[in-house]
Structures are given as structure tokens and as C-alpha cells.
Amino acid sequence: MRTPVFTGVCTALATPFDSHGSINFEAFGRLIDAQIAAGVDAVCVCGTTGESATMSIREHIAAVEFCVKRVDHRVKVIAGAGSNDTSAAAYLSQHAQDSGADALLHVTPYYNKASQAGLLRHFEYIAERTELPIILYNVPGRTGVSFAAETYQALAKIPTINGVKEASGNFSLVAHTRFLCPDDFSIWSGNDDQVVPMMALGAKGVISVVSNIAPEVMVKMSRLCLDGRYDAASKLQIEYMELMDALFSEVNPIPVKAAMNLLGMEAGPLRLPLCELSEGNTAVLRRAMVRVGLLE
């Protein structure tokens, strides 16, 4: 039986940069510590929110190593290692394992638009080259390809594939996956605005962007669901919908880094081709943050 890598909340960490565009490790360390103090169950480094797409291999490895050392076994560390180059994904996975990460997050190969057979072979290749548990990541809006439930069923036969971060927004796919796959193939919500319905379908929690700025809220929401208190969790989900919408008014992580900077968290700039949040959406974001008490 596979044990879920985590249950509850994993924060998809933003990567703070300094004014020169280099990783601001001091701010990164403070962010990690604050997340752990707020009660999150895991952190994910070098994922989409961490701007891994614009990191060099050397920076990627350094960020994972730093995160593992800073966390120091206080919570689980999930290292993003996905690539549209299968050999590069295996290479990043091996380095994450050597660094002491607890698990890997692997997005479907982007741009290539692999077939379902190609997806199966891609993840089989990676799984053969690492001992770490692998969380698949389905986000077709960014990659151009989605898993089919039958592909999950085939991949679930690989013991080290722990489950999937589902950010497709396709609840039918989630339901069919739950039907076809064994109970120990875990699902996590990849969308903050769908935590409660996803957990009602059996998801183990969420890999969250919102928790960069409101970790206590996401921790409470997930724990209410895990306790079967869906009415209370639903009220919390609805209460924070305006903020969640504002945090995805432009492509992630543009709004969340803006929010972090508004809170004095020194997230710094984005790397091109991402650029700063528009004035209009900044005003919307600020109003949403004021409404829930994050800003005065």
C-alpha cells in the first residue's frame, strides 16, 4: 500500500528574486519558515509558482538543496522536476533525490503534446531512474495535453507513482480516475478554488498557491474537509473566492508575487516573459486582500 506523500496543504512556493533577478535566499528562507509555522504539511519547490521554467539547471538544483536544508525534516519537501525533455526530467529527479527531497512533482511534458502512450513511456522512464515517490501534475491549460483516466490507471501500477495533482478542473476526469485507480493512488487539488469539491471526491488535500499569503486559511479548509466538515469548509472556500479569483486574474505567479510584495514579503520581481501585474488587477487584488483582513 502506498502512503500519500502528504495530506492537507502543500504550499507551491514562490521563488523570491532580488533586484538583479537572482534568487533571494534570505527571503526564501523566511517564506519557508513562515509556511511551516502556519502548519502546512509540505512545501513544493521549483514548481510553476516558483518560476522553474526560467531557472537554469544550476539554479534549480541550488533552490532544491536550499529548501531541503532549510526545512530540515520539519515537513515534507516536494521537488519540482518536470520537463518536456524526458532525460532532463530524470536528471533533475536524481539530483532532487541526492539533495534529500521527500518526493517529486512531474508535470506532463509541455509543448511536445505527447500522446497517452508517450506520457506513459515518459513517466515509466523517470520512475525507473529514481526511488522517490512521484506526484504527477495535470495542468492542460499550461501544457496543452491532459492525462486520460485510463493512463492514470496504467501509471498507478508503478509503485513509486504516488498520485496526481489535478489542475484540469475536470471533475468527470477526477471521478473516473477514482473509479479506475486503486484507493492508494492519491489525488490532490491543483486549484485553490476547487479544494472542497475535490476533497469531497476523495482528494487528500491541495497543492496551493494561495497559501503563500494565507497559509492558515488553506490549512483550516483542508483539515475541515479531512474531518468531514464540508459545510464549514464550503463557507470558508466561498469567503475567500474573491481573493482566489484575484490571485489568478493573470497567469500564476504574477498576482501572488504582487500580493507577497504588498505584504512586505520581498518576493521581488518576476522573470521575463512574465511581467508585473497590471494596475487594474493590482487594485482588484488589493481590495480582495483588504476584504479578508490581509491588508488594512
Image (cartoon, rainbow, N blue to C red):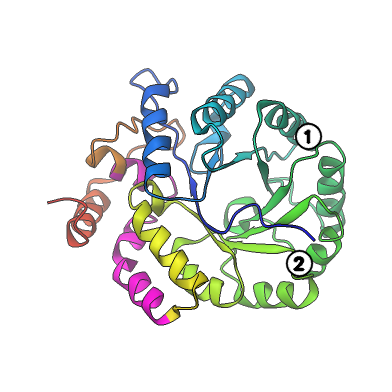
Q: Is residue 9 left or right of residue 5?
A: left
Looking at the magenta stretch, what is its main secondary structure? helix
Amino acid type for the residue under numbered disc 2: Ala
Label ID, residue 148: 2
Q: Quadrant of the N terminus?
A: bottom right
Locate residue 140: give its quadrant: bottom right
Let me know if residue 234 is in the magenta part.
yes
Circle 1 is placed at which residue position? 90
Magenta span: 231-259
Residue at left offset 39%, top offset 56%: 248
Residue at left offset 87%, top offset 41%: 128
Q: Between residue 237 and residue 76, name the one nearer to us.
A: 76
Question: Where 94 falls versus 152 (above or below)?
Answer: above
Amino acid type for the residue under numbered disc 1: Ala
Disc 1 to disc 2, C-alpha distance: 23 Å
Q: Position of residue 225 (x, y in %)?
A: 48, 72
Whichever of callouts 1 and 2 sits on the residue coming sooner in the sequence is: 1
Locate residue 204: give its quadrant: bottom right
Q: Position of residue 104 (x, y in %)?
A: 68, 42
Element marked by disc 2: loop
Question: Where 101 falls versus 76 (above or below)?
Answer: above
Element marked by disc 1: helix
Indicate which label's residue lies in the foreground, 1 or 2. Answer: 1
Q: Position of residue 158 (x, y in %)?
A: 85, 54
Q: Is residue 127 left or right of residue 166?
A: right
Q: Between residue 209 and residue 226, name the one nearer to us.
A: 226
